[in-house]
Amino acid sequence: MTPSIQPVILCGGAGTRLWPASRGARAKQFLDILGEESLFARTLARVAGPGFGRPLVICGTQHVAMVRAQSGDHAPRLIVEPAPRNTAAAVALAVAGASPDALLLVMPSDHIITDVAAFHRAIGQAASLAREDWLVTFGIEPERPDTGFGYIASGAPIGDSAFAVRRFIEKPPLKDAEAMLAEGGYSWNAGIFLFRAGAMRAAMLTHCPAIFEAAEAGFAKGAENGDTLLADRTAFEAAPSDSIDYAVMEKHDRVAVVPVAMGWSDLGSWQAVHALAGCDEAGNACAGDLFALDSRGCLVRAEGKRVSLVGMEDVAVIVDGDDILVMPLARSQDVRAAALARQ
């Protein structure tokens, strides 16, 4: 890897997919989901050391205190968004403050990567493409026909380890996901990107100029306080809200994918948490005092509560304060409806 790789950690989100444990300022990335340390702390740790520059964290005002509290010795720089404007505007803020030749590694703050060495190898492979002005994304080798992820279709090979992106596919129905896995050449979209800042700036000015210009103005007019810059609210709020995938990656003609198997999960649902949690011989994963009779494949997070399950299979019981969530794990994608109803 090259010393010029700049980690950019996107640390926003509404915190609804792991409700009720995750919400508001206590968003998913700041939780100890799988033990020992938060997802945000793990993300910082995997881009520390040789080959990486000082991390840049982009977050909202409500998350500044948690970012500082959980950064430890990593001492990131912060750019604070005065209002949520999705990932394209967040990426534009990072690009606006970077030198044109800097390689920016943009990643979410709330993912799990268990094989960090494989991740670093993939970054090294992607860096050479990024220097040639490819916008590089990382594709995860699919383990199953999952309908909760977007997919990337690989096109013509680029060297030995990458492909030109043929197209992006939004979260598909199960039949389409099964067909893509049977055909081969598809990977899950992990939402991790590597690019030269100047190349992304040019791409954004071509495909989403209103977003980039608003973010650039927000950065230029922002208020600095030590290692923190608060983007100017009036300028930044003029940015349309759009994802980097929609705004740039799906439109640009020079996008590459590096497929990688690195033990990745976005922990985007309680079902995903159960899949990675330590389970007993009956497949139950429990954080709290659990009595389980003839119950299998359940997830229980109820610290300080005594939970009893009788004859239950594949259910989640999540207790946080006065909020209690009970559902089949297979319905995990519907948690957002409960979170919004209980706001």
Image (spheres, rainbow, N blue to C red):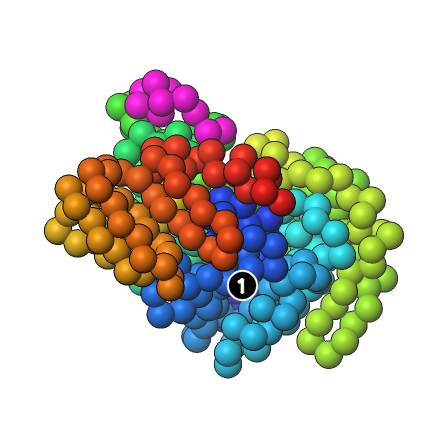
What residue is pinned by disc 1? 7
Residue 241: percent from left, percent from top? 71, 40
**Magenta residues?**
170-180
Q: Is residue 71 visible?
A: yes
Q: Residues within 10 Å of mark 1 (few under 14, many from 20)?
A: many
Q: Residue at x 34, y 38 (%)?
A: 329
Q: Nearer the viewer, residue 130 or 268?
A: 268
Q: Is residue 47 above or below residue 312?
A: below
Q: Specify whether residue 172 is painted magenta.
A: yes
Q: Specify whether residue 236 is painted magenta.
A: no
SS of the residue at dot 1?
strand
Q: Is residue 37 left or right of residue 281?
A: right
- Which amino acid type is shown beneath numbered disc 1? Pro
Q: Residue at x 78, y 44 (%)?
A: 239
Q: So how many labels did they put on this image?
A: 1
Residue 78: percent from left, percent from top? 66, 68
Residue 200: percent from left, percent from top? 64, 48
Q: Residue most toward the left?
A: 281
Q: Residue most toward the bottom?
A: 73
Q: Residue at x 76, y 76 (%)?
A: 225
Residue 55: percent from left, percent from top? 56, 69
Q: Is residue 210 left or right of residue 137?
A: right
Q: Residue at x 49, y 44 (%)?
A: 17
Q: Is residue 40 left or right of residue 298?
A: right
Q: Is residue 277 visible?
A: no
Q: Nearer the viewer, residue 8 or 27?
A: 27
